[in-house]
Image: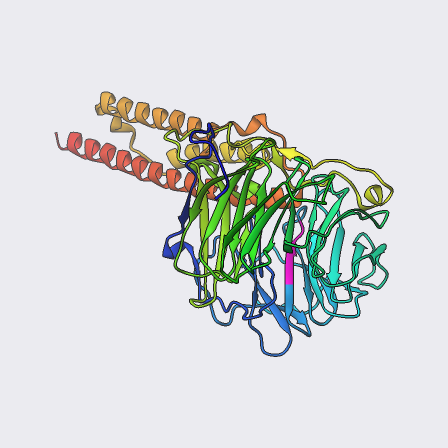
């Protein structure tokens, strides 16, 4: 393992992986048997998409994220490709748009309906035609809206501007024809101004995508690279591959000097690919092995030894592919800092695995949740193409913040008015005899109880389940944010209806008590 001192202060020394229970997994999912080295899974806060087996052409499933358990064998699919689907990626700025590429040499953009799928989707929103051989990789630009990169077996990387109104786009805005073999991996730096690629010719290239020029090139012969990854703003690259003796190997590179790696380490003798994932908020690096069930995780530091081994999540179930949830979809109440979705084709199962920081406090842990990338683009496509660079728009993960997971302020006042009107109508709905003043103390107690219940109900309405006042926060800015807030508001409405029903029952009980008091006094 990497060298590290006997004691090192870190908030993430005790991070552990926790697999979801059986009822929170996705069962009976026909996961693809394709041998292509990709993730085959894409996740956002609303949906999980997974490439599936399909006779004739290619298809993938889009399942609502909360629809766990067994999947209907006739569940609708997205099946417009004529060849096997090789890669799928969600638009980072629109949770209802997904891109897919295929062996049929096309890239397709799909609109996913906000309601549940009822039939197969075969017509894409846009179709990108430019590659002459199968397309193996696609990547969305991290800060510019509607910019998509695709890489094919024709050794070319194409840049597409999806702002075009045409349903079929045949002319990419830029073609990068600088590779001599198949591109195996693509990764952007934080603001998307640089692109790192790993090629089958064993070279890592650092590219200016707009100029189409190679800025740095690594041809280190003892490391056969498969995947490459930018490590946020640390000006370093991380790569996985194999050594001369075919051991699985990881390497760390200086972005400004790719001649020799800063660090090189052999892991084991397995043959499966290693998928790297980096969390720039916590500076944690995850290495997921294809064909085994292990997830190694490290902490990256700017000084030597750079790579600090933390721990390894082990499982006897091998993974074929893996998906990751964006930070805005994590459960901050349980101190979850990363979440994987593990594809297990031997059991037709998708298993969520949460990486958790053990904390005793149930309050929001601000030190492990810094400002993170949100769902708003920093640039338009035209601005980026003209040479403008901007970092991602950052948001807070704190429950109730105005940027993420807030409730729309225009729903709740209507609810409060409706509740008051309903309470008045309920109290005047039935006639109560005028002679019920025989025991004014009991009636006064009943009225006092109703008033106390109304006050407590108003307090509950003002302070909602996530613990903040909705009137202090602005309305949502995007359609996806609005929809997420609407779902949470529906849960709040359901809870308030239950409170109304309980109060109705108590009102009826008081009315019956008053009638009993009236009948008892009438006898005397």
Residue 448 location (% of width, % of height)? 31, 23
Count the marks: how many?
0
Q: Compare residues 76 and 254 and report the one nearer the observer.
A: 254
Task: Give the answer, above or below, for where 32 lies relative to 234.
Answer: below
Residue 485 in view (yes/no): no
Residue 459 in view (yes/no): yes
Q: Which residue lies furthest to the bottom in this view?
A: 56
Q: Main secondary structure of the magenta part?
A: strand
Asked whether residue 48 is drawn in magenta, I would say no
Left or right, 77 with reference to 355:
right
Left or right, 333 with reference to 504:
right
Q: Quadrant of residue 505?
A: top left
Residue 337 location (% of width, % of height)? 50, 39
Identify the residue at image location x=68%, y=46%: 93
Task: Give the answer, above or below, for where 128 lies relative to 503.
Answer: below
Residue 327 location (% of width, % of height)? 56, 41
Task: Give the answer, above or below, for where 358 lies relative to 121.
Answer: above
Residue 184 location (% of width, % of height)? 68, 59
Q: Which colour scheme is used?
A: rainbow
Identify the residue at image location x=32%, y=35%: 507
Task: Give the answer, above or below, for where 23 lies relative to 422.
Answer: below
Q: Compare residues 204 and 35 and report the one nearer the observer.
A: 204
Magenta segment boundaries in residue numbering: 87-91
Q: Which residue lies furthest to the left in this view?
A: 524
Identify the residue at image location x=64%, y=47%: 229
Left or right, 326 with reference to 123:
left
Q: Quadrant of residue 402?
A: top right
Viewport quadrant of the C terminus = top left
């Amino acid at each position: 393992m990497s060298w590290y001192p006997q004691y090192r202060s870190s908030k993430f020394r005790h991070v552990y992986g926790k697999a979801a229970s059986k009822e929170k997994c996705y069962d009976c999912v026909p996961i693809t048997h394709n041998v292509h080295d990709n993730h085959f899974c894409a996740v956002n806060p609303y949906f999980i998409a997974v490439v599936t087996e399909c006779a004739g052409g290619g298809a993938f499933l889009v399942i609502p994220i909360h629809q766990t358990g067994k999947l209907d064998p006739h569940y609708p699919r997205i099946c417009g490709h004529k060849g096997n689907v090789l890669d799928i990626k969600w638009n980072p700025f629109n949770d209802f748009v997904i891109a897919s590429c295929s062996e049929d040499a096309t890239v397709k953009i799909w609109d996913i309906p906000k309601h549940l799928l009822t039939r197969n989707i075969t017509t894409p929103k846009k179709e990108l035609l430019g590659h002459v051989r199968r397309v193996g990789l696609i990547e969305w630009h991290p800060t510019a809206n509607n910019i998509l990169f695709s890489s094919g077996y024709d050794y070319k990387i194409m840049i597409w501007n999806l702002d075009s109104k045409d349903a079929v786009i045949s002319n990419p805005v830029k073609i990068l024809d600088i590779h001599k073999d198949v591109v195996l991996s693509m990764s952007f730096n934080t603001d998307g101004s640089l692109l790192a690629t790993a090629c089958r010719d064993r070279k890592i290239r650092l590219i200016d995508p707009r100029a189409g020029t190679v800025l740095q090139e690594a041809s280190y012969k003892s490391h056969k690279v498969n995947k490459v990854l930018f490590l946020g703003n640390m000006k370093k690259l991380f790569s996985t591959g194999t050594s001369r003796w075919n051991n699985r190997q990881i390497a760390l590179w200086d972005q400004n000097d790719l001649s020799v790696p800063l660090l090189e380490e052999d892991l084991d003798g397995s043959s499966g690919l290693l998928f790297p994932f980096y969390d720039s908020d916590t500076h944690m690096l995850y290495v997921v092995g294809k064909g085994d069930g292990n997830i190694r995780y490290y902490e990256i530091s700017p000084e030597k030894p750079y790579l600090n081994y933390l721990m390894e999540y082990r499982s006897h179930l091998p993974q074929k592919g893996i998906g990751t949830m964006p930070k805005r979809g994590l459960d901050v109440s349980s101190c979850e800092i990363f979440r994987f979705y593990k594809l297990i084709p031997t059991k037709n199962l998708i298993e969520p695995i949460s990486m958790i920081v053990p904390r005793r406090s149930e309050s929001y842990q601000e030190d492990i949740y810094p400002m993170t990338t949100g769902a708003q683009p920093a640039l338009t496509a035209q601005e980026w193409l003209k040479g403008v660079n901007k970092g991602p728009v950052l948001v807070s993960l704190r429950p109730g913040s105005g940027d993420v997971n807030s409730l729309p302020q225009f729903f709740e006042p209507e609810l409060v008015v409706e509740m008051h009107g309903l309470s008045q109508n309920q109290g005047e709905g039935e006639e109560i005899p005028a002679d019920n003043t025989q025991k004014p103390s009991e009636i006064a107690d009943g009225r006092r109880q109703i008033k106390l219940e109304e006050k407590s109900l108003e307090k509950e309405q003002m302070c909602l389940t996530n613990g903040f006042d909705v009137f202090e926060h602005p309305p949502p800015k995007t359609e996806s944010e609005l929809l997420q807030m609407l779902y949470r508001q529906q849960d709040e409405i359901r809870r308030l209806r239950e409170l109304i029903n309980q109060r109705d029952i108590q009102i009826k009980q008081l009315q019956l008590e008053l009638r009993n008091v009236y009948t008892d006094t009438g006898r005397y």
